[in-house]
Amino acid sequence: EAAIPYAEFGLQTSKEIGNRESEQDNLNTLALIELGLNNYTPALNYAQRSLEIAKELKSKEKLRDVNLTLSTIFQELGQHDQALTYFKAYTSNKDSVLNATQSKQISELRTIYETEKKDQEIAMLAKERELDQIKKTRLWIGLLLSLGLGSLLIFYLRQKRKKDNQIFAQQQIIEQEKTRNAQLEATRLERELEFKQKELTAKVLQLARKNDFLQVLDQEVNKIREQSDTDVKNATRKLSNMIHRDVDAETDWDDFLSAFKQVHTSFIETLTTEFEDLTTNDVKLACLFKMHLSSKEIASALNVTPAGIKKARHRLRKRLQLEPDQDIHTFFIQYPTSKT
């Protein structure tokens, strides 16, 4: 894949300077590259264009090479008849080139042997020694360059590994710190929620105890009123009214609902959205069920009798459309506390 741009550049350059031989070579090279990438359609296109130029040039060497390329492409495509045809052409061109080359070489060798045998032998020996020395020099230079490049590569890899290890260690520390902070935050939130739940329960129980106390106090005031004169009865009646006003006051409930929403953030909003016909008392009762309080505690908190709680629970079940075997306490305990 990396070779394709260079071959295409070579092809374009050959076209620009009008070098048909180079153009044919580049087309055949592109065909071989695409063949190696299993891109048979472009490979076949390049090879056929190369064959046309080779025929134009009437070059047996180039015809030999491109016919071999085409034979290979058709073989890969499973078109064996076509592959055989081009392979035969390749063999024919190969034999012709070989025969022509051999004839030429034999003629030249005969001429050299007959005319310049001794001088040529001396020159060949000198040339061989010179070439051998050049090869040895290049070999040593190559070895030294390889050693140098190898040393640089090893040094680079060691430094890179060292740097990567440092980065990895820093990332590990950062991840550990993030995990620790997340655990601390989760613990803090869990403790905060636990504290708010205890505080909320305490508020409800305090409200229930207050209502119980006020009811007892109201009963005692009624006893006094029954056994007293008119002035005392009037005074106790005023005191009783004050007790009832305090029991019925919504201030304590407002404080309770504010604290409840901090623990169960979207419980009321989700519930009233799903069941639009719920009353205010239904919502209060649902909140107390969510806290898993007993019927007695709920009755005290709402300042009603256990029988009243039973009736209110029955009405609430109908509005929620619960099945007969479905427990209302379990329904509210499992009801989502916050939006997901």
Image (cartoon, helix red, strand yellow):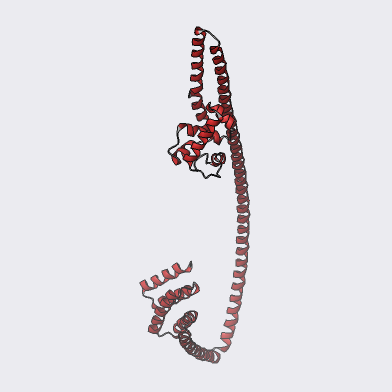
The residue under the point 49% across, 79% down is 76
Q: Which of 175 and 325 is in front in this view?
A: 325
User: x and y percent of residue 263 in the render?
Assistant: 54, 34
- In percent of width and height, residue 167 lies at 60, 48
Query: In this orientation, does residue 121 appear?
Result: yes
In which quarter of the view is residue 174 placed? Answer: top right
Q: Position of residue 183 (x, y in %)?
A: 61, 40
Q: Name the residue nearer the viewer: 146 or 71.
A: 71
Is residue 117 placed above or below 319 in the rendered structure?
below
Q: Where does residue 20 sit, x and y in percent of width and height?
A: 39, 78
Q: With respect to residue 158, does 131 lie above or below?
A: below
Determine whether 300 is above or below 236 in the image. Answer: below
Would residue 266 be visible to someone looking at this image? no
In-front residue for pair 203/312:
312
The residue nearer to you, when weighing 243 against 159, is 243
**How many numbered badges does the structure rendering display?**
0
Q: Give left or right: position of 151 versus 317.
A: right
